[in-house]
Image: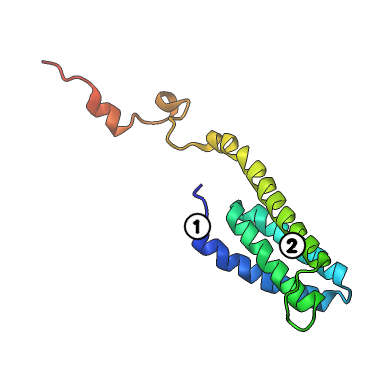
Amino acid sequence: MRRRALEVLLPAGFGCAVGACTLASLAFSETTGRVVLMAMVVGVFGAWARHCLAALATGVMAWCFATGFLAHTGGELAFGHDDLIRLAAFAVVALAGCACGLARRSGRPYRLMRADLRRDPILLRKLHAVPVQERRKKPRPS
């Protein structure tokens, strides 16, 4: 399976951050619950994206929304002690989600090898007709 393009993942991460901020503001009234919900969304996005740069960018965008709109309701970014702890938490959750997605994906090719359609069926000559390619390969009598 191909990797997802960064040009697609960054806008998708931005949409996830905006959606998580909207959902968190409607679901919880205290800052801690809002930040935890946004961190969970960032982790799930990182696991889905399996791209560390996109996951980190989504974590930073989520931190901007959480700090600007959920923690400080005036829409201003601040770099206080709590804000920097939140930034570190979003970065760690984003990378952990990406690592979980990559670890989950690493075992997948072995399961997909069973369904490889390029292989010949086991009973090719017993149950099925001989393919046209094999008929052409037979030497002609001289």
Work out which residue is located at the far right of the displayed protein and give it: 30
For this view, does 30 lie left or right of residue 75? right
Residue that appears at 43% across and 30% down: 120
Image quadrant where residue 85 sits: bottom right
Mark 1 against mark 2, which lies toward the viewer?
Answer: 2
Colouring chosen for the image of the structure: rainbow
In the rendered structure, are the residues bearing label 1 and label 2 in contact, judged by CB atoms less than 8 Å apart? Answer: no
Alpha carbon distance from label 1 to label 2: 25 Å
Q: Nearer the viewer, residue 11 or 53?
A: 53
Identity of the amino acid at label 2?
Leu
Residue that carries the numbered disc 1 in the rendered image: 5
Q: Which residue matches tag 2? A: 87
Whole-percent x, y for residue 115 in the image: 53, 37
Q: Nearer the viewer, residue 21 or 84?
A: 84
Q: Secondary structure at mark 1?
A: loop
Amino acid under disc 1: Ala
Who's the residue at 73% across and 79% down the image?
A: 76
